[in-house]
Amino acid sequence: MSRLVVASIGPASSVQDGGRHGAQRYGLTVSGAMDRLSLAAANTLVGNDPFAAAVEIGPFGATFTAKDGAVRVAISGAPRNADIGGKPVAMDTSVTLKDGETLTLGFARGGAFTYLAIEGAIKGEQVFGSLAVNARAGLGSPYPRPLQAGDEFTVDAASGAPELRIELPKPARGPIRVLLGPQDDEFDDANKALFLDSEWKISATSDRMGYRLEGPAIKHLHGHNIVSDGTVNGSIQVPGNGAPIALMMDRGTSGGYPKIATVITADVGRLAQTSAGTAFRFREVTMAEAQDEARKFAQLIRNLPDRLRSSDTIALNIEALSDANVAGYAVSAVDAGTWQVTAEP
Amino acid sequence: MAATLPPPRLLPSGDSAVTVEFSRTIDDDANQRVLALDKALAASPIDGITETVPTYRSLLVHYDPGKIGFDALGEKILPIATQPLPPATKARRWRIPVAYGGEHGIDLEDVAKALNTTPDDIVARHAGGDYKVAMIGFTPGWSYLSGLDKSLHMSRRQSPRVLTPAGTISIGGIQAGIQCLAAPSGWHLLGRTPVRTYQLHRNPTFLTEPGDRVTFFAIDHKTFEELDRAAEAGEIVAERVDA
């Protein structure tokens, strides 16, 4: 066994996987990766199950050092500068850290979360099939809290498999798509239109539990109290002050504010990767379109292994690569165009 | 119960869940129907349903749109949801010890003042109630109870507290609650229980289920400390009285 030591890490970084399912009826929060596609891409690069446990790294930098042997890792998600001993490492590629080597990741440049998957995956004690950290409930493994410098993972020694890159679809563009409801009838047409037609920004006070949206105040038809009912990832509730909150992975399983709309499954990760302060819009879609996109999204994740390529052919202009990614994440969400997940490259 | 029931509303909660809503208010009949539908779906699972979450008035059904579409799922759920209610099964009953007032129930005196009575009277009314676990939600084990004495109905606090202690026993609006973990809350804190409705390495992990009945009894703060230590060690310090 090798060890991967967290030499330094910013706040809002934790172990996450596909989430904890089956106990929402007891109030047990789902948690799991904010951006499931990027988690799956990183895992696929090192031969893991797509939703295996990996390190979700928040907007700040982090460094990881291999000890007692080599460790093979991969990074995907919000783009960053990355290097091993000064030698650049590209996003969406696997790389092997030799014993004693350190991987340095800079701040996220556009986007919020980057995933570091480790060959053989992070090991720990599962609760309801998951290692995902839910700090409020003191759940998660091997550390039931955000990661700190000095934490370490006991991991498989690097297999020596050839390094890979993964060709992901072009970064998302266009508004974040929503289905209205389940309580859109708690708002009149003018306020629904205000929600759908306005430009929104994610507040800096947002976290894994919810993204607070800055924009016009949305008024309720009958006040802001409803009898608590169930929530899903991407529920957009409107509390008394009229400022919507998009509920994210650490959401409470129930809530007592009317939910005007729900972000479609295929776009929840895209909303998660929208940086604080970046303007974006919502667009209403039909159930048929939303479910079609959900199926394509699931298929995209299932077929990720088909997108693996040898890393020999990678263009080594890291700056150009990163900039291309930044443009995709940072400025696209206001465009009127529609983002389509395509099942094929 | 009437043989024909008004059909529930099927409200889309995104592309992978549907809220089956029986009522917009807290209503025991509606809650009975929620729990009955939940049980029926557990007994004869519909392919594609991944998880259900019963609440006071609705059943949230999570499903995989790769396996079943919204319309097809609705067509399967509606006939089950409109069946006459099955005969009531015997509920599990719990007696939950509570250390009322003082540091454990910092709002008890204010609640008494607001309702023009004494803290002892509030305790008697709260502990004298017969409650039902209508739903569990928000954080692990947080049990929302129906059956709060009408004289104790009062608006939630103007500004919610950022953090209230694990085990908090509180009231808010027309609801009473047992809170397991430390959490934000805008409810009024009457006391604290040593009972863990959720404890990770205990069997069972979750003590209460929707549909369970609950009564409270007062303990002194010293007894609280003793029971709290026992509970911390994994003992179930709630009394089960239905068996």
Image (cartoon, helix red, strand yellow):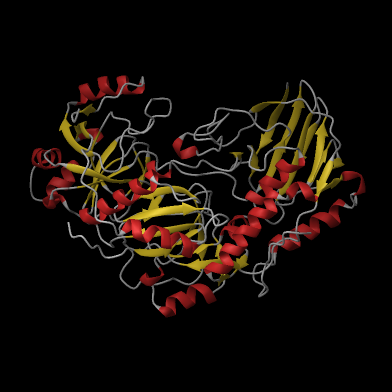
B35 sits to left or right of A91:
left
> In which quadrant of the rendered view does residue A276 lie?
bottom right
Asked which quadrant contains residue B202, the reply is top left
Quadrant showing the N terminus of chain B:
bottom left
Q: Quick one: quadrant of the C terminus of chain B?
A: top left
Whether residue A102 can be seen here: yes
Left or right of residue A160: residue A110? left
Q: Is residue A324 above or below residue A101?
A: below
* Image position, residue B124 (x, y; %): 10, 38
The residue under the point 29% across, 29% down is B195
How many badges with numbers are in the image? 0
* Residue A319 sits in quarter: bottom right
Give the percent coordinates (x, y) of residue A203: 54, 59
x, y percent for residue A84? 83, 37
Q: Position of residue B132 (x, y in %)?
A: 22, 44
The correct choice, above or below, for B177 with respect to A151 in the image is: below
- In this rendered view, identify the residue nearer to me: A281 or B15: B15
Q: Is residue A276 visible?
A: no
Q: Residue at x 37, y 28 (%)?
A: B204
Q: Is residue B121 above or below residue B47?
A: above
